[in-house]
């Protein structure tokens, strides 16, 4: 449990939501344990593991993330100040404040909360050459580059399509909303923020034949008891054991 909480605190909330993966799987995919004490009573729990990870546009459960953080590879780790109230979501319209596309507006395509990055669809691009070898000159493609949400972009107020600073406030019914500081209007969170790798919206998802239905998931199929595996099998088969096991001691 300690290992899980240590690793998962580096992964952004919205990255986990988009992946639609359980925390236990993300923890196993990220963990790089070099040495661990045996699980025996005479050993204190000690673990030597990788604690500092370099995050980029590759998700923590991908092979490229493992290659970038493989043992022995040195990185210049950048301290990222976590944002308490994350305000940029997939599908938001934002305005770019810096670079060659300054003043242009676009839709948020990807969120990388671990680095306070977003990618805007079709903007802030860079040419990259792929498939180049001695017999082929390669092909150039335009690849979107991440933008820092703290200084390089701002949200667009849908009431007048102008960039604005925002603030989180509560409505009378307790709902938390984004408010434009320039116009005072609510900037709704887009429906696209619910999108994951498995579905566009959770409400539109239809159960598949191999899905575990909710009724089966709530059934209790195992009741724990203070029995060994052999004792449990004997009770199930109605076998009575009258012999008394000899006491054993561990020093």
Image: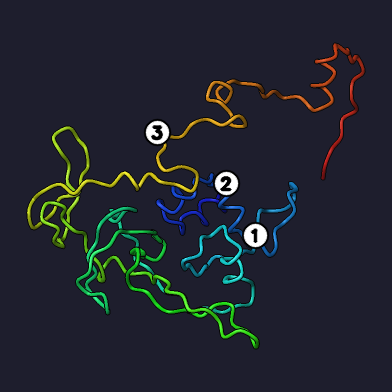
Task: Say which residue appears at 19% left-offset and 58% top-offset.
Answer: 156
Residue 121: quadrant of the picture: bottom left
Mark 1 or 2 closer to N-term? 2
Q: Nearer the viewer, mark 3 or mark 2?
A: 3
Left or right, residue 38 beside residue 178 = right
**Camera-side residue of 26 and 146:** 146
Q: With respect to residue 186, does 171 lie above or below?
A: above
Task: Say which residue appears at 23% left-offset and 65% top-offset.
Answer: 105
Task: Say which residue appears at 58% left-offset and 67% top-offset.
Answer: 64
Mark 3 or 1 closer to N-term? 1
Residue under circle 2? 24
**10 Å neighbourhood of mark 1: few (<14), some, or many (≥20)?**
few
Residue under circle 1? 47
Q: With respect to residue 170, does 4 lie above or below?
A: below
Element at label 2: helix
**Camera-side residue of 132 and 73:** 132
Marks 3 and 2, how far apart at CA? 25 Å
**10 Å neighbourhood of mark 2: few (<14), some, or many (≥20)?**
few
Residue under circle 3? 203
Left or right, residue 15 beside residue 74 = left
Left or right, residue 238 beside residue 212 = right
Marks 3 and 1, how far apart at CA? 42 Å
Query: What x and y, as percent, mark residue 113?
Result: 39, 60
Query: What x and y, as percent, mark residue 179?
Result: 15, 50
Query: What x and y, as percent, mark residue 221?
Result: 65, 21
Left or right, residue 101 beside residue 249 = left
**Camera-side residue of 87 and 220:** 87
């Amino acid at each position: 449990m300690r290992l899980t909480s240590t690793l998962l605190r580096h992964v952004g909330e919205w990255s986990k939501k988009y992946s639609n993966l359980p925390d236990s799987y993300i923890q196993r995919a990220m963990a790089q344990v070099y040495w661990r004490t045996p699980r025996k009573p005479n050993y204190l729990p000690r673990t030597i593991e990788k604690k500092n990870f370099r995050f980029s546009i590759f998700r923590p459960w991908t092979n490229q993330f493992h290659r970038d953080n493989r043992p022995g590879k040195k990185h210049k780790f950048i301290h990222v100040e976590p944002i308490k109230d994350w305000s940029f979501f997939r599908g938001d319209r934002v305005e770019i404040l810096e670079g060659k596309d300054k003043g242009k507006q676009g839709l948020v395509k990807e969120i990388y909360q671990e680095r306070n990055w977003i990618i805007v669809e079709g903007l802030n691009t860079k040419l990259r050459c792929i498939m180049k070898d001695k017999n082929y000159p390669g092909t150039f493609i335009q690849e979107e580059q991440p933008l820092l949400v703290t200084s390089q972009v701002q949200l667009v107020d849908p009431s007048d399509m102008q960039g604005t600073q925002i603030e989180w406030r509560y409505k009378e019914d307790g709902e938390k909303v984004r408010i434009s500081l320039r116009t005072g209007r609510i900037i709704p969170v887009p429906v696209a923020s619910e999108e994951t790798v498995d579905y566009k919206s959770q409400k539109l998802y239809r159960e598949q034949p191999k899905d575990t239905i909710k009724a089966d998931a709530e059934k209790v199929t195992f009741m724990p008891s203070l029995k060994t595996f052999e004792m449990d099998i004997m009770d199930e088969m109605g076998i009575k054991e009258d012999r008394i096991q000899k006491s054993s001691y561990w020093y």
